[in-house]
Amino acid sequence: MDSFWANALWSLAPTVLVGLIFWLVMRSIIHADRTERKVYSRIEAEERAKLGLDKPVT
């Protein structure tokens, strides 16, 4: 029975590892996108302030 659990663990390990790597990659992509949007909004607001515009055009 001890061999059964070891085999079960080793058979699930690659799937869990690939899932974890996928999660980390997707998390970093989403975080980078969020940060980029925040910085872009700040730069756009600064440029609008320089031009004397009050509200962004939607």
Image: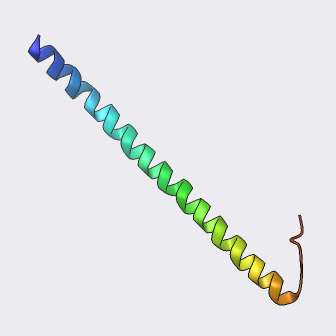
Q: Where is residue 25 in the image (x, y as percent from the top left)?
A: 44, 51
Left/right of residue 9 with respect to residue 37 in the rendered view: left
Q: Work out which residue is located at the far top of the displayed protein and give it.
A: 1
Q: Work out which residue is located at the far left of the displayed protein and give it.
A: 2
Quadrant for the C terminus, please. bottom right
- The number of callouts visible is 0
Question: Is residue 5 positioned above or below 19 on the image?
Answer: above
Q: Work out which residue is located at the far bottom of the displayed protein and give it.
A: 50
Q: Where is residue 2 in the image (x, y as percent from the top left)?
A: 10, 15
Q: Which colour scheme is used?
A: rainbow
Quadrant for the N terminus, please. top left
Q: Position of residue 19 (x, y in %)?
A: 39, 38
Residue at x-position 82% and y-position 82%: 48
Left/right of residue 42 with respect to residue 16 in the rendered view: right
- Closest to the observer: 27 or 15? 27
Residue at x-position 89% and y-position 78%: 54
Residue 56 falls in which quadrant of the image?
A: bottom right
Question: Is residue 6 positioned above or below 27 on the image?
Answer: above
Left/right of residue 17 with respect to residue 43 in the rendered view: left
Residue 11 falls in which quadrant of the image?
A: top left
Residue at x-position 49% and y-position 49%: 26
Left/right of residue 58 with respect to residue 14 in the rendered view: right
Residue 12 falls in which quadrant of the image?
A: top left
Residue at x-position 66% and y-position 65%: 37
